[in-house]
Image (tube, rainbow, N blue to C red):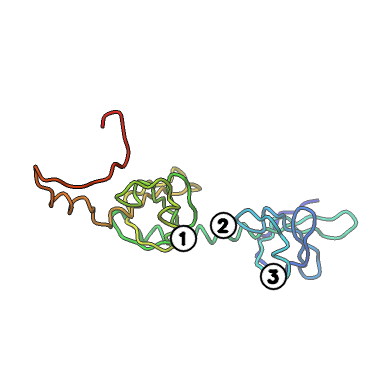
């Protein structure tokens, strides 16, 4: 018969990898943590956690069938709670127009995601610089620290959602075209390079 868990947090050692997850021991009792609950990211090889002392949340407590008490744990629940707390604290500190420092966490064809200290924002490919950028990887890399300006903050539609934060690196860099345009004189000759050809020019 399953019993509701008091949602206790325990700290114990991961002892082995078993089918579907990892095994730990809680006060002499075998406990199980599903591989989907060992981390808040996808885990390809749970063996990396064996031998580590980690904190878990007891999510299920039930009577075993002739084998004593069965415990089901989750580390992911704790990690998500911590992430939410960091995100809330970070959200209180930022505002539109502010310049902040962040770390690139991942890249996509349309831009780079930047961690602002617990909350992520999107640095769109068009905001990476004044020049045309084919792909974010041509300009930035995962793990790189950079300064960005907060362009827009769209609040989440519900409590479980995330605020959409738009970032810009372009806004912090002087437009090289403005300086060049000031040196252009009508009728003067300049040497240039054809960058691309369109139907209209």
Per the image, the residue denoted by label 3 is: 52
Judging by the rendered image, the residue that carries numbered circle 1 is 118
Residue receiving disc 2: 80
Residue 81 position within the rendered picture, expressed as x and y whole percent measured from the top left: 55, 59
Displayed quadrant of residue 13 = bottom right
Q: How many discs appear?
A: 3
Pick out the residue farthest to the left: 186
User: Which of disc 2 and disc 1 is earlier in sequence?
Assistant: 2
**In the structure shown, which secondary structural element does the residue marked by tag 2 occupy?**
helix
- Give the foreground label among 1 and 2: 1
Q: Regarding mark 3 in the picture, which secondary structure is present there?
A: loop
Say which residue appears at 33% left-offset and 55% top-offset: 169
Among numbered discs 3 and 1, the one appearing first in the sequence: 3
Which secondary structure lies at badge 1? loop
What is the spatial separation of the Cα atoms under label 3 and label 2, in whole angstroms? 19 Å
Asked if the residue at tag 2 contacts the one at tag 1, i.e. Cβ–Cβ closer than 8 Å, the answer is no
The residue lying toward the viewer, choosing from 186 and 6, is 186
Place of residue 39 in the rendered image (x, y in percent of width and height, measured from the top left): 63, 58
Graded by Cα atoms within 10 Å as few (under 14), some (14 to 19) or many (20 or more), the crowding at tag 2 reads few
Q: Residue at x 9, y 43 (%)?
A: 186
């Amino acid at each position: 018969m399953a019993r509701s868990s008091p949602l206790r947090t325990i700290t114990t050692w991961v002892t082995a990898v078993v089918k579907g997850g990892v095994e730990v021991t809680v006060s002499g009792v075998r406990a199980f943590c599903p591989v989907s609950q060992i981390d808040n990211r996808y885990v390809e090889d749970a063996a990396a956690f064996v031998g580590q002392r980690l904190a878990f949340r007891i999510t299920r407590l039930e009577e075993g069938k002739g084998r004593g008490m069965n415990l089901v744990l989750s580390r992911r629940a704790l990690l998500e709670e911590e992430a939410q707390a960091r995100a809330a604290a970070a959200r209180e500190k930022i505002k539109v127009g502010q310049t902040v420092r962040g770390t690139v966490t991942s890249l996509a064809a349309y831009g780079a995601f930047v961690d602002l200290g617990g909350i992520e924002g999107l640095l769109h490919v068009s905001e990476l610089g004044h020049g045309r950028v084919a792909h974010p990887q041509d300009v930035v890399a995962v793990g790189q620290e950079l300064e960005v300006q907060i362009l827009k903050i769209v609040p989440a539609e519900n409590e479980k959602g995330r605020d959409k934060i738009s970032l810009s690196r372009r806004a912090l860099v002087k437009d090289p075209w403005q300086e060049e345009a000031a040196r252009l004189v009508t009728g003067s000759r300049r040497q240039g390079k054809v960058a691309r050809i369109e139907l209209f020019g």
